[in-house]
Amino acid sequence: MLLRSALGEALRRLRLEQGRTLAEVALAARISMPYLSEVERGLKEISSEVLAALCAALGIELSDLLVAVAFHISASNGAVTVVPVRRTAVGRFEVAAPPTRRAGDAYALAA
């Protein structure tokens, strides 16, 4: 699976879960609607700056998105699920791990 496909799928799922249109999110992120559509379909590579703008527009931390995409790429099946990453009261982060571990699983830590 290509990284751009996994990112696009995750971004699309988040947008649809929020009940927002391509036009609304593109406007909030200050990118064109056709470009966002191509990103969501995995047809265009996305820069870190545009990815950060899309995360801000969708109200998600970039690190949360990257962790979810890393879990999705390491899994052989299932839909992209955004894994919550929360800061604890003492300033540490809690990351939900995949339900099972297999040989070859990959984990990504994002700050």
Image (cartoon, rainbow, N blue to C red):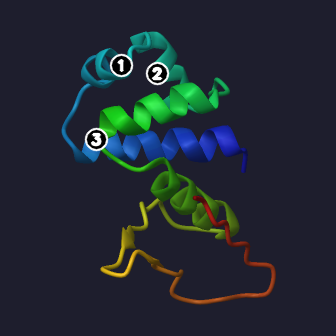
Q: Residues within 10 Å of mark 2 (few under 14, many from 20)?
A: many
Instruction: Report the residue marked by disc 2.
Output: 36
Circles 1 and 2: CB distance less than 8 Å? yes
Instruction: State the residue at coordinates (37%, 71%).
Output: 87
Instruction: State the residue at coordinates (65%, 38%).
Output: 4
Label 3, label 2: how many angstroms apart (C-alpha)? Answer: 13 Å
Q: Earlier in the sequence, mark 3 or mark 1?
A: 3
Q: Amino acid at mark 3?
A: Leu
Q: Using the image as rendered, state which of residue 25 and residue 30 is in the foreground.
A: 30
Instruction: Report the residue marked by disc 1.
Output: 26
Report the disc number at residue 55.
none
Q: Amino acid at mark 1?
A: Ala
Left or right: 12, with 28 as reference point: right
Circles 3 and 2: CB distance less than 8 Å? no
Q: Using the image as rendered, state which of residue 78 and residue 71 is in the foreground.
A: 71
At numbered mark 1, what does the secondary structure look like: helix, strand or loop? helix
Q: Amino acid at mark 2?
A: Leu
Q: Earlier in the sequence, mark 3 or mark 2?
A: 3
Q: Earlier in the sequence, mark 1 or mark 2?
A: 1
Residue 12 x/y as whole percent: 40, 39
Label 1, label 2: how many angstroms apart (C-alpha)? Answer: 6 Å
Q: Using the image as rendered, state which of residue 21 and residue 28 is in the foreground.
A: 28
Instruction: Report the residue marked by disc 3.
Output: 16
Quarter holding the C terminus?
Answer: bottom right
